[in-house]
Image: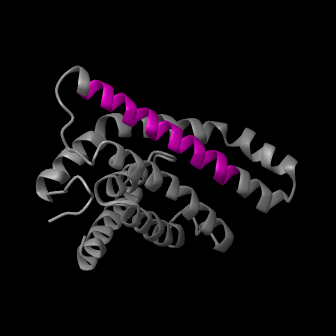
C-alpha cells in the first residue's frame, strides 16, 4: 500500500472511530471503535490497524467529556486496543482479506467466527486494561483482583456489544469497504 494511502485510511478510520465514540457516549462500553480497528487491520494490515488504534485512543483518551485518561493509562488502553488490530490482521491474512462471505451457511459460520473473535478480543482487552489499571491504582495483586471483580459488569457489556458488532456490523463493513477500495489478497490495495 502506498504510504499516503495508508495515512489516509488511518485518518478516515480514526475519525469514524472517534466520532462514533462521541455519538455513543451515553452507552458506556458500547463502541464501534473496536470494530473499526479490526476492519482496518483486516483489510489493510496490522500497521494500519495499529495506527487507527493508537490515533483513536490518543484523541478520544485525551479529549473526552468523561475525563482524560492520563499518561500511564492512555498507553495501557492503546496497547489493549492493539489486540483488535492483531486479531483483524491475523483473520484477514487467514481469510486472504476476502470480502466474499458466501451465502447461507458459509456466511453464518464466518459471522459467528467474527462474533467470537470480537468477544475474545474484548475479553483480552478487558482482562489486560483492568489488571494494569488495578496495579496502577492499588499497586498490589489484590488491586488487580479488585478491578477484575468491580469491572465485571462493564467487561460483560463490552464483550457482548463487541460480539454483536463483530457478528453483524463487521461483515457489512468488510464487504462495503472492499467494494469501494479494491483490496488484493496480499493486503495491498489500489
Q: Main secondary structure of the magenta part?
A: helix
Q: Is residue 42 left or right of residue 144?
A: left
Q: How is the image coloured?
A: one colour
Residue 103 drawn above or below residue 24: above
Q: Residue furthest top?
A: 105
Identified at 72% across, 57% down, the residue is 132
Report if residue 127 is visible in the image: yes
Exactly how many numbered labels are in the figure? Answer: 0
Figure quadrant of the N terminus: bottom left
Q: Nearer the viewer, residue 160 or 166?
A: 166
Magenta stretch: give its range.
107-130
- Residue 3 image position (x, y, % from top left): 28, 78
Q: Residue furthest bottom?
A: 4
Residue 147 drawn above or below residue 160: below
Q: Nearer the viewer, residue 21 or 91?
A: 91
Q: Nearer the viewer, residue 62 or 100?
A: 100
Q: Nearer the viewer, residue 10 or 109?
A: 109
Q: Is residue 128 left or right of residue 117?
A: right
Q: Residue furthest front?
A: 186
Figure quadrant of the C terminus: bottom left
- Residue 88 image position (x, y, % from top left): 39, 50
Report if residue 161 is visible in the image: no
Identified at 45% across, 48% down, the residue is 87
- Residue 41 image position (x, y, % from top left): 36, 57
- Residue 175 image position (x, y, % from top left): 19, 45
Amino acid at each position: 500500500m502506498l504510504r499516503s494511502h495508508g495515512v489516509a485510511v488511518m485518518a478516515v478510520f480514526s475519525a469514524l472511530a472517534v466520532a462514533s465514540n462521541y455519538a455513543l457516549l451515553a452507552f458506556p462500553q458500547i463502541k464501534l471503535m473496536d470494530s473499526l480497528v479490526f476492519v482496518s487491520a483486516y483489510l489493510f494490515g496490522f500497521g494500519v490497524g495499529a495506527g487507527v488504534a493508537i490515533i483513536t485512543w490518543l484523541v478520544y483518551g485525551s479529549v473526552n467529556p468523561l475525563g482524560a485518561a492520563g499518561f500511564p493509562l492512555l498507553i495501557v488502553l492503546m496497547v489493549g486496543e492493539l489486540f483488535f488490530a492483531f486479531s483483524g490482521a491475523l483473520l484477514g491474512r487467514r481469510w486472504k482479506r476476502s470480502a466474499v462471505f458466501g451465502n447461507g451457511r458459509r456466511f453464518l459460520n464466518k459471522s459467528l467466527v467474527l462474533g467470537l473473535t470480537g468477544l475474545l478480543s474484548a475479553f483480552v482487552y478487558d482482562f489486560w486494561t483492568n489488571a494494569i489499571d488495578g496495579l496502577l491504582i492499588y499497586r498490589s495483586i489484590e488491586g488487580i483482583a479488585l478491578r477484575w471483580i468491580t469491572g465485571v459488569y462493564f467487561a460483560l457489556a463490552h464483550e457482548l456489544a463487541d460480539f454483536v458488532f463483530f457478528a453483524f456490523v463487521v461483515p457489512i463493513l468488510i464487504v462495503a469497504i472492499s467494494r469501494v477500495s479494491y483490496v488484493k489478497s496480499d493486503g495491498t490495495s489500489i
